Amino acid sequence: MTSSILPLLLEPEQLAGFLEERNALLQQEPETTSETPALADASDRIPIRIIDLCAEQSYQTGHIPGAIHLPVQALFSGQGIAPGKLPEFSQLQRLFGHLGLTPDTHFIVYDDEGGGWAGRFIWTLDVIGHKHYSYINGGMLAWRGAGLELEQNENHVPPTYPALKINHQPVAEIPDILNNLGRPNFTVWDARSPEEYRGDKVFAKKGGHIPGAINCEWTNLMDPNHHYRIREDAEERLGMLGIRKGQEIVTHCQSHHRSGFTYLVGRILNFDIKAYHGSWAEWGNHPDTPVEQSRL
């Protein structure tokens, strides 16, 4: 398996320059024959998939050239009391076959809301053990803010039939949390609003938070003055709250959408982080899970 050709955190201008150079190389390639395979299939070339997780109307209005639109519903099961949980294995196989996954494919991911859905997609890549990916810092908001090229073509790729394997390391379940509550090195990062954390706003049978959890709302780590890029002082802000390197961190929200972003931030900061995909929809509706209610 090859190493990644682009960094995890990718600025829009970096990607624009990369695509321009790549397209120039494509145009220099000789006409494809059986003896001269296409660039994307050559052994020394890496397949690229730009994944657009914006609203469908946003994609139709204009998207990054070459981007494939993916409805966010493909990323979760949609079943039971915790519809945000990981989809069934067969659904994951169909999803990544549709996206043309190969062992070397490099995914470049963005959305139009600051990184929640993009982070959820990257967590899903970690769950299937695929490590070649980049997040466009600020997503479509930053891309448009930089005045970069847009297109309106609807893009598709030839399907593949990947043999997926599930990597459970990035996934947290209720027993993983219950068995570690109270350990000094274990931290639960609650990405919901302060109102949800306190129990003032309730979207389950029980309101409040996991005992000992630290609340840092996902949007607190976005910089609205720079097109919702990740704040440059994100690590410092988290450290002041008690979330830092060297801890075993589990992040969650209500449905593992907002915590898709906090998981992504943790990966970028090289934290030891997992995501609790059942999130509060599961924890807050479970009869045996402990809950705290407190003022921030």
Image: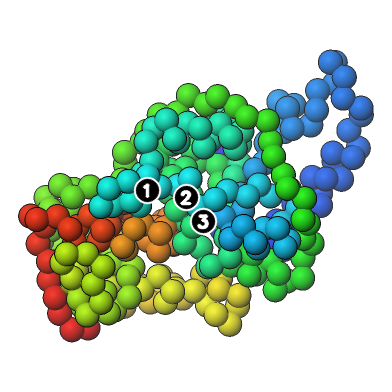
* Residue drawn at (79%, 45%) of the image: 22
* Residue drawn at (53%, 68%) of the image: 114
Q: Amino acid at mark 2?
A: Gln
Mark 2 = which residue? 73
**Within the image, what quadrant is residue 286 found in?**
bottom left
* Residue drawn at (68%, 30%) of the image: 158
Question: Residue 223 appears at what percent x and percent y?
Answer: 52, 77
What is the secondary structure assignment of the residue under circle 1?
loop
* Residue drawn at (56%, 71%) of the image: 229
For the question of whether residue 243 can be seen, the reply is no
Q: Quadrant of the N terminus?
A: top right
* Front in this rendered view, residue 267 or 62: 62
Q: CA distance from mark 2 to mark 3?
A: 13 Å
Residues packed near mark 1 inside 10 Å, few (<14), some (14 to 19) or many (20 plus): some
- In the rendered structure, the answer to whether residue 204 lies left or right of residue 43 reads left
Q: CA distance from mark 2 to mark 1?
A: 8 Å
Question: Residue 262 appears at what percent x and percent y?
Answer: 40, 63
Q: Are marks 3 and 1 in contact (CB under 8 Å)?
A: no
Q: Quick one: label 3 or label 1, which is nearer the N terminus?
A: 1
Question: Residue 150 appears at what percent x and percent y?
Answer: 77, 60
Q: Are marks 2 and 1 in contact (CB under 8 Å)?
A: yes
Q: Amino acid at mark 3?
A: Ala
**Within the image, what quadrant is residue 92 found in?**
top left
The correct choice, above or below, for 214 with respect to 100 in the image is below
Q: Determine the residue located farthest toward the top in the rendered image.
A: 34
Residue 118 is marked as 3
Mark 1 = which residue? 78
